[in-house]
Image: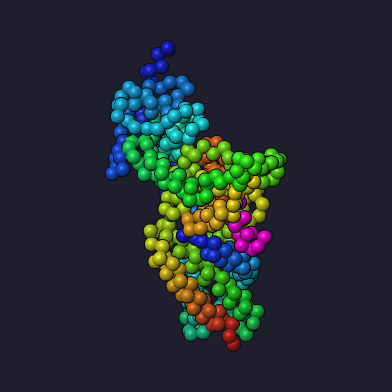
Amino acid sequence: MTDSNTETLNVSVWRGDASGGQFRDYQVPVQENQTVLDVVTWIQQKIDDTLSYRFACRVGMCGSCAMTVNGEPRWTCRTHVNRVTQSSSLEIGPLRNLPVIKDLTTDMDPFFDKWTKAGGTHRASRSRNDGMVPVDPASKERMIASEGIECINCAVCYAACDTVAANPQYLGPASLQRAWTLVNDEKHDDRSAVLRAVAAEGGCYNCHSHGSCTRYCPVELNPMKAVAGLKRTTVAKLWGK
Amino acid sequence: MIRPHRSHPLWIAFILHRISGVVLALFLPIHFYVLSLALTDPTALDGFLRFSDLFVVKILETVLVLLLAVHLFGGLRLMAMELLPWTNWQKSLAASSIALGSAVACLFFLKVV
Amino acid sequence: MLNVRLYMLQRLSALVMAPLVVGHIAVMIVAVQGGLTTAEILSRTQGSLWWMLFYGLFVIAVSVHAAIGLRVVAYEWLGVKQKLSALLSIIVFIGLLILGMRAVFAVTLS
């Protein structure tokens, strides 16, 4: 190991719980190739083992480590420190728009409740005895569905969305994008039920197309496009098309 | 208000659309009241129109035209995005709608002074 | 906050207004040259059924559009409760409609 520990990073980490809290400062040695999650882990292991945060896979698959980094929602395991800060300071907080449990850990229940409310639970159109619905991967519908199915439910888009912040009923980008994939999924039973769910109170019409969801989605999906698709499809249905 | 997560073109287009909408909605009652003076008190209306010859007022009028034009083109962009097939140049469209609105306001300003 | 009915009303009123706004801006750019007077405005509009229809339709559409827009802003930004913002919206609609129609009649009736 070279002596890289002379350089340090000033890290402000939000500490507290549902009743409130504040940022506390930590000094973390700079490493080459250091992710924000590495920094949080270093603090938890070397300075304060009461620091709570959530992670699992560390490779951008599981969607559990999202936090607010320098004011922007990020997946911390795939966010390199030198990509989010020019100076040697870093501010790390819990995701916005979700209740804080403790420190950097948020309660994801509202996020997944809305996911269900938008009709996100898969309902198979056939039983195991009927055989599979043949799906042509090149069909228009399947290609639309495929655009959104790589969502890892990290809630970065949900935290980035100002409409979610302003309107507690709003289902949010992730759940609506999930609904849009099901609307275009031939294997999903009763797809019009999904359209009814997203057209209900708190649904797709509340979106103001800020585009923050698409701007911040770590896997580069386009929830804003999906919501526009839902608006267009539900309105066309109203016109009997 | 421009927090880090908001500094991107489509969010700025949104805030312009919303602020222009609110200002225009608040301006409307004044606009309607002044015009209805034509019926109730024409001399007062003429007095008001002379007041609008002031340079400051012309600037304010131009700002209103700018807000109206930006709201118009921004709104058309939103409806195109929602109701027409998707295009991948939303940021360029947003910038164009703001530019077009500004151009209209400039034209108005050149004619009014 | 917004359901399909309000959403569609908002878009429909916007579509109706788009050409009207273009016309309005064009008239303004032409009319403001050399300053405005009451007589000049009235000579253009008074007794004209077309201008009455133009501005009448404009007033109806803008009343709907502004009422729905302000309803959302009140709910999202001012924290006005949903029922109250709906009431506010209706008041804005009726208020603008009355004021606007008065203005239209003031400049078009001869």
Colouring = rainbow
Q: Could you say which is closer to the camera, residue A27 or residue A140?
A: A140
Residue pictured at 43% horizontal, 21% vertical = A31
Q: Could you say which is closer to the camera, residue A64 or residue C61?
A: A64
Q: Which residues are magenta?
A: A228-241
Residue pictured at 36% horizontal, 36% vertical = A104
Q: Position of residue A3 (x, y in %)?
A: 40, 13
Q: Quadrant of residue A237?
A: bottom right
Q: Position of residue A71 (x, y in %)?
A: 42, 40
Main SS class of the magenta portion in the image: helix
Q: Position of residue C75 (x, y in %)?
A: 42, 60
Tell whether A38 sits left or right of A225.
left
Q: Residue furthest bottom?
A: C110
Residue A74 versus residue B6 in the image, above or below: above
Is residue C74 among what the camera can see?
Answer: yes
Q: Position of residue C101 (x, y in %)?
A: 53, 79
Asked if the stretch drawn in magenta spans residue A8, the answer is: no
Q: Looking at the figure, which quarter contains the C terminus of chain C? A: bottom right
Q: Residue furthest front?
A: A129
Q: Residue furthest top?
A: A1
- Total tally of numbered discs in the picture: 0
Q: Could you say which is closer to the camera, residue C3 or residue A189?
A: A189
Q: Could you say which is closer to the camera, residue B63 or residue A177?
A: A177
Residue pictured at 37% horizontal, 36% vertical = A105
Residue pictured at 63% horizontal, 47% vertical = A184
Is residue B5 among what the camera can see?
Answer: no
Q: Quadrant of residue A14?
A: top left
